[in-house]
Amino acid sequence: MFSDGVLAIIITIMVLEINGHVGNEFSDLIVLFPSFISYILSFTYVGIYWKNHYHLMQSISRINGKILWANLHFLFWISLIPISTKWMGVHNFAKTTITLYGVILFLCSVTFWILQSTIIAHEGKNSIIAMAVGKDTKGKISLISYFIAIWFSFINQWISIFIYVFVAMIWLIRDNKIERRINTGEE
Amino acid sequence: MFSDGVLAIIITIMVLEINGHVGNEFSDLIVLFPSFISYILSFTYVGIYWKNHYHLMQSISRINGKILWANLHFLFWISLIPISTKWMGVHNFAKTTITLYGVILFLCSVTFWILQSTIIAHEGKNSIIAMAVGKDTKGKISLISYFIAIWFSFINQWISIFIYVFVAMIWLIRDNKIERRINTGEE
Amino acid sequence: MFSDGVLAIIITIMVLEINGHVGNEFSDLIVLFPSFISYILSFTYVGIYWKNHYHLMQSISRINGKILWANLHFLFWISLIPISTKWMGVHNFAKTTITLYGVILFLCSVTFWILQSTIIAHEGKNSIIAMAVGKDTKGKISLISYFIAIWFSFINQWISIFIYVFVAMIWLIRDNKIERRINTGEE
Amino acid sequence: MFSDGVLAIIITIMVLEINGHVGNEFSDLIVLFPSFISYILSFTYVGIYWKNHYHLMQSISRINGKILWANLHFLFWISLIPISTKWMGVHNFAKTTITLYGVILFLCSVTFWILQSTIIAHEGKNSIIAMAVGKDTKGKISLISYFIAIWFSFINQWISIFIYVFVAMIWLIRDNKIERRINTGEE
């Protein structure tokens, strides 16, 4: 409930950053274009995390203190996405802003993995969630990709952006493993 | 839950845009009048969507991944209403701002229709929701009206605004089809 | 859920208005004092409405379209409290800001009464909520008080503020009628 | 629900305060460092309160009016954390800002204790929550620590900050008393 609220606020406040005292011509909106693109990317990422978080939380039979802390830890890092997104948009995807964005995505990914591991440790190795997560190939690919993207951001930030979009695509297209398992498990 | 949160935030943050460093005379508030009118219009639209979304979600027996993505897609477009509303209010309903508002309403309508279709495809053609939606006459009228309003916004924006108000009226006055069906279905 | 979200946002965003580029001395905070007092008053009012709304919603056996619209109508007017609060704080309780505040409190009160009446009409005259509301003496006193306060705000705003505080006190001190009835009804 | 919403908004809006028109170099971010540190501290505190609040609310068998008011009272004081955090960050942890932060933490602690006592009075001395809270050693240590920290803030604010961090640590590390009791009570 609390997490849903935090994620809902994070995803929505980002839109407030796409502003500025622009004129009333369509051409005046061009200046907002980088902010708009950043918003789409971050909206997608927070959306993906929300969906994964939703499935993860559904799989919990009983919440304990460790899970609550791991959850807060994850929420802390994802709460930094709006300011990183704004920085990226305001400075037209400057190299440094892309590095920071990658670092935050990397930390979101790491803390989500900690949350997931904490839950699996609590639910047991034979639980539906443990089997659904399995080797967590997508999680590992994401982590490595962010790492590569951070490295590339010092050389050419467009490659990094391409990697961020690519990782988002992986999650958007093939994102039904846990879901399928939970459904099968329930029926 | 998450969607309710996002819609609640969207509807509420718009009020933050009605500000400015106005003096303490009633006459100083006149400058905020266009922003206030924009707020009423957008509050009504988000309210209508919230009500329709609420009935739609009530009708789902089981959520799947496709529905979650269709839902996020719809939430993305509706999240742009606050900035479009602000633009409209700040520039006294200038033609371009009315065009953009229409485009966003059009896209909200399209993505809501996608969400609705995804749910119907999942629930089956004989489900309560499928029968309640039926031919979705109001949805079709809205889409065509937005299209006409966008076209008119290049000529005379007041006609477009009239159309936006008119479409909102249709939904406000005759908005109990799904509701009635669901209730009948349950009793 | 949605209403709870909207009320939670309204009550919280007001705190964002207590700011300004103040120095780091305690004496620099004095300039924020009127904003802080406005915040306390509005926090109390939104809190009272939230509590009454909570009890009202608990009493509903089935939601219908009319109730949802009446609810949105009420939420619209209460959503204007933050900007009115800000205006009041920024201009040190100037007469005009007190008039506007009273008008908004009056309209919140009227629309809450409409919501309440819509629910009672739906639940029936012998329902727990109908009996709990009864003659709604406090509601009537509030309406009349706001009316008097608006009138006084043209002469001396401090009398109006005193009335606003007084009305809030009535609700804070004797606010357990519906609650008691619902509990008795359930047991 | 409402409280969860308020706490979710409080914890998230603080991140909006870490901004400023900074350049696109990493060195430009240094100016935001105090704001970032303040954010971490306040995020942790609000997180701790959310967790304690969550366990407390779980323990209630029936809500009454007094509990709702005590809850609102607590939410009022915690809602001041974002502005105090901002003040602290903007002025690089100046002595006065640390005093104010301590006063607000102290009042949050007092009002949380009032909320807790109201609930225990309602649930009875033999309830799970009454036994779980017990002597409330951590609560007492926190109150005394805040008091000492406020006193030190007039002399050396870094000692006060150290105390704030230290108190947060106590709650982070040993925070499973109520939780354990509730679980035991349920099984």
Image (spheres, coloured by chain):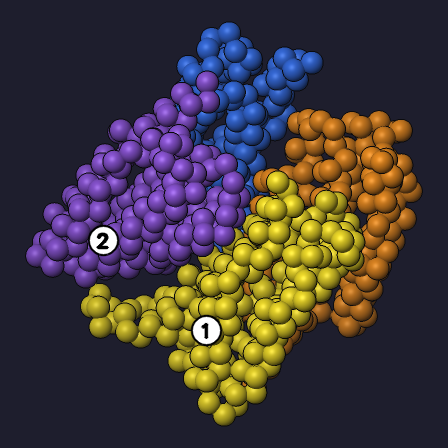
Chain colours: A purple, B blue, C orange, D yellow
User: Residue C125 has which mark?
Assistant: none
Look at mark 1 in the image and give the residue it sits on: D165
Instruction: Note whether D110 is above or below D71 in the view shown.
Output: below
| Circle 1 or circle 2, nearest the eye | 1
Residue at the extreme top of the image, as rendered: B126
Estimate the x, y position of residue A111 in percent, counting from the top left. 33, 51
Label 1, residues with CA under 10 Å away: few <14, some 14-19, many ≥20: some
* Cα distance between the residues tagged 1 and 2: 29 Å
Q: Secondary structure at mark 1?
A: helix
| Image point (77%, 35%), residue name | C59
In the picture provided, is C51 more to the left or to the right than D55? right
Q: Nearer the viewer, residue C133 or B162?
A: C133
The residue labelled by disc 2 is A102
Q: Is residue C46 left or right of residue A175?
A: right
Element type at mark 2: helix
Q: Is residue C177 placed above or below D168 in the rendered structure?
A: above
Q: Amino acid at mark 2?
A: Gly
Could you tell me residue B7's position as x and y percent? 51, 40
The residue lying at 19 percent from left, 41 percent from top is A141
Q: Position of residue B174 (x, y in %)?
A: 62, 22
Question: Is residue D73 visible in this depiction of the protein?
Answer: no
Q: Nearer the viewer, residue B33 or A61?
A: A61
